[in-house]
Amino acid sequence: MVTNDNVPLEWITDISRLDFDSLVQFFGAVGFGEASDYEIFRGIPDYVNKSMGMFSHSILAFEKGLLVGLAHVFSDECSCSWLAEICVHPRLQRRGVGRELMGRVNDRFGHTPLYLQSFPSQTGFFQKCGILPKPKLVACAGTSRSVPPETEPPQGIRIINGLPGIEWEQIGALYTAAGFEAETRTVGGCFGIGIIAAFALAEGRLVGLARAMTNFLEVAWLAEICVHPDWQRQGIGHALLSAIRRQVPKSAFYADAFASQTEFFSKCGVTPRPMLVSCSRGPIGPAGERHVAP
C-alpha cells in the first residue's frame, strides 16, 4: 500500500519484527498511555509475543522500519473474533491506513462474526468497514481491582476450570438448549489456545459455561456465558463469571451485555462504560479472501 504522500508501507503479521520499545513508543504516540505505564511489563520474558502474538493475531504496518499502524485481534477461528485495538500513528491518520488495517482484519477473520468496543466518535469509521453499532448491547468492562472474591457456588453445583472430563457432545447440547446455534462438530474449535473457560456441573450434568479470550497479561474478553434454561436464576451465572475473572485477575476484562443483563455483570465487577459503544458484524466470507465492506 502507498499513502497519500506516496510513502510505501510494509504490512506484516510476524510479531517477531516488533520489539518492546517500538511498541511502547507507538502506543504513546497514539494516546495509549505513557511509556512509564508499560515499564511493569518490561521484565516479562517474551512480553511482546505473549501480548500481541502468541494467543492472538496482530497486523502491523511499518514505514521505513517504524511501526505506524496496528490491529490486534483475538479469535477462536470458528464462532467469533474480537478486535482489541486498532490504531494508526497520528502522522498517517485519515490517509487510508485504518481502512486498510480493517480490510486485512476482515480478510483474515471474515469467516467469523467480529465484535469490538468503539468510542462514539469512531463508529462512523467502523460503519464504513461494515461494522455497525448494536443498540441492544451495552459495552462493559472491569479492572483488576473489581475481580470478585471467591465464593461458594450454589448448592449442588460444582464449578471447574478447563476441559478435563467435559464431553464435546455435552457442550453442544448446552449451547443448543441456551439458544446458541452451535453444531457439535464445530464446538471443539472454540476452546483452543488463548481461550479460558469455566463449567458448571450438577450431578455430572453440564448446566452452564463461560468462555473468554485472553493473552493472560493485560486483557480478556467474554465470548459468552450461558446457563441451561432449567438452571437459570440460581446463581450459576454469577459463579461462572466470577470463576472466569479469577483466572485472569490482573487483566482488564471486557464484555458486551444486553441492557437487561447489566445489573448481573455489575455484581461481578464488570460495569457499563458509557463512553464505549458495542459494535459487530456477521460473517462475510471465507478466511483468506478479499472482502469489501458493504
Image (cartoon, grey):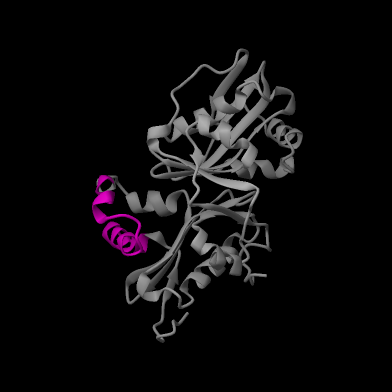
Looking at the rendered image, the quarter that the C terminus falls into is bottom right
| Residue 93, x across and y down, in percent | 42, 73
Q: Nearer the viewer, residue 167 or 27?
A: 27
Residue drawn at the location 45% of the way across and 30% of the way down: 246
Residue 285 lies, with reference to residue 202, above or below; the image says below
Q: Main secondary structure of the magenta part?
A: helix
* Residue farthest bottom in this picture: 6
* Residue farthest top in this picture: 155
| Residue 61, x across and y down, in percent | 42, 70
Residue 223 lies, with reference to residue 125, above or below; the image says above
| Residue 143, x across and y down, in percent | 41, 39
Residue drawn at the location 63% of the way across and 65% of the way down: 130
Let me know if residue 32 is in the magenta part.
yes
Q: Does residue 61 appear left or right of residue 136 in this picture?
A: left
Q: Nearer the viewer, residue 60 or 262?
A: 262
| Residue 167, x across and y down, in percent | 67, 30
Let me know if residue 106 is in the magenta part.
no
Q: Nearer the viewer, residue 232 or 135?
A: 135
Q: Does residue 69 appear left or right of residue 195 in this picture?
A: left
Residue 28 lies, with reference to residue 78, above or below; the image says below
**Magenta span covers which residues?**
16-40
